Amino acid sequence: MAGENQQLNESVVIRSLRRFRDRYFTNSRTVFKDDSKPVEDTVEEPQPGFLDSLPVDVQFQIMTFLSPSDICRLGATSQYWRAMVRDPLLWRYFLLRDMPHWPSIDHLSMPQLDAPLISEDESVDDREEGEDKGMESKFDYMSEYLKGCPSCRQRWLPSRPAYEVVTSFLQSLVPSSEPRYAMFGPGMEQLDVSLVTRLMHAPDVLPVSGTPHRQINGIGSGISYLFNNQHRFNILTLYSTNRAERERARVQQQSIGNKLFTLVGTNESGHPIYSPAPQVQQVCQVVDGFIYVANAEPGKGKTSAAAVSHHAHWLLSFKSPAQDICMEPMSSIGEGESEVAQIRAVLSSGGGSAPRPLLVLSCVSREESEATTLQAAPRRNRARCRTPCVDMAMRLGLPQLANPWMVQDTVAESLSGLLDGISWLLRCSGVKL
């Protein structure tokens, strides 16, 4: 069934590209049907080159093997390819195919999943080369892809002005205080491999630099780590309950009461409203940001109804070819809504002038084993038994937040992806790396 859906999606794109080519080369059929016959003198009509003369489905297959940068370079070779590679349906296909495999996403690169959908009749074949007026009102899937794709993200985002670079250098000469972060979330307690334990015993990744003397009643002082052997930062770990109860609930795969929050009621939409415990509120007042450890293992992480409804509408209209991603059950909507409400309760506590950053570690216990992946298949076509980071952002309601946020795929056993997330968090806190 997944293969049939992928073929259907490809056929939609190929049909759109073929319609554009037929319009661009109005005499293409005369040229290719019989090469022995002389072609009428059509000086004003563009003539196809060798690569242009390939069947459209072959052209499409070639583009599926190219990187985004290579596709953009292909568009610089001629006017025909410039228009061909800008087809919105083509880039929507790439977006839905590759997005589940992106290892990170943030508030600046998150694709607009509620963008207006376009039909084949509204695609690039309805405009002549150079007539861009009609495209202004249509959604730019090419820009959304280049903005969100990790390999293109840094080049797509605007660079800092020169005066900011000079200011950053001067600020780096002034000793800064050690930033503190509060870390919480179900991924710290539900996974078979403890992220916190691995973090404390991984000197090759993040060396432990000591324990501060600052104490918070009921919480402690946290543990300080050293990033790149020069930048100190502190993590305060917030567990939902004591160790014995957490271990029993993990083994029996049962949910436990969260002592960090108190349910105070529901809002007009029926969503829960939580209030952090007094010691948690005290932590929120002194930290510079938050680390939320989410459980990205299928069947354990929970999906909120709003996120599922919003994202499903977008995906079902043009179903992603990455059909082998393990989906999560719909029976756990309540806990997903609790996650959203608890994150918002923490972010709103403590006040402050500037919104503090939120790093979401979308965590699984171990790397995907070779037994669960097809070694011969390209990476984008392999099954991924983890929640994609874009889906995690939707599940936690992150696009609706005013705070800077980032979702980073992380593996507890190897700590892969952790340094990328910490680097982003430190930069958001003003640390010059």
Image (tube, rainbow, N blue to C red):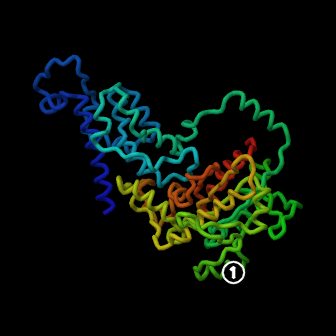
For residue 184, what is the image quadrant? bottom right
Q: Residue at x 71, y 81 (%)?
A: 244
Q: Quadrant of the N terminus?
A: bottom left
The amino acid at mark 1 is Glu
Element type where label 1 sits in the image: helix
The picture places residue 216, in percent across and down from the top left corner, at 84, 65
What residue is disc 1 on?
Answer: 245
Q: Residue at x 75, y 57 (%)?
A: 350
For residue 38, what is the image quadrant? top left
The picture places residue 57, in percent across and down from the top left corner, at 27, 43
Tell me: 199 left or right of 28: right
* Relative vertical location of residue 275 with respect to residue 75 in this rendering, above or below: below
Q: Residue at x 16, y 17 (%)?
A: 41
The picture places residue 197, in percent across and down from the top left corner, at 71, 68
Q: Quadrant of the C terminus?
A: top right
Residue lying at the far right of the rendered structure: 213
| Residue 413 appearing in the image | no
Tell me: 68 left or right of 219: left
Q: Residue at x 63, y 78 (%)?
A: 256
For residue 335, what is the image quadrant? bottom right
* Relative vertical location of residue 67 with respect to residue 314 in this rendering, above or below: above
The picture places residue 252, in percent across and down from the top left corner, at 59, 83
Tell me: 217 left or right of 284: right
Tell me: 69 left or right of 347: left
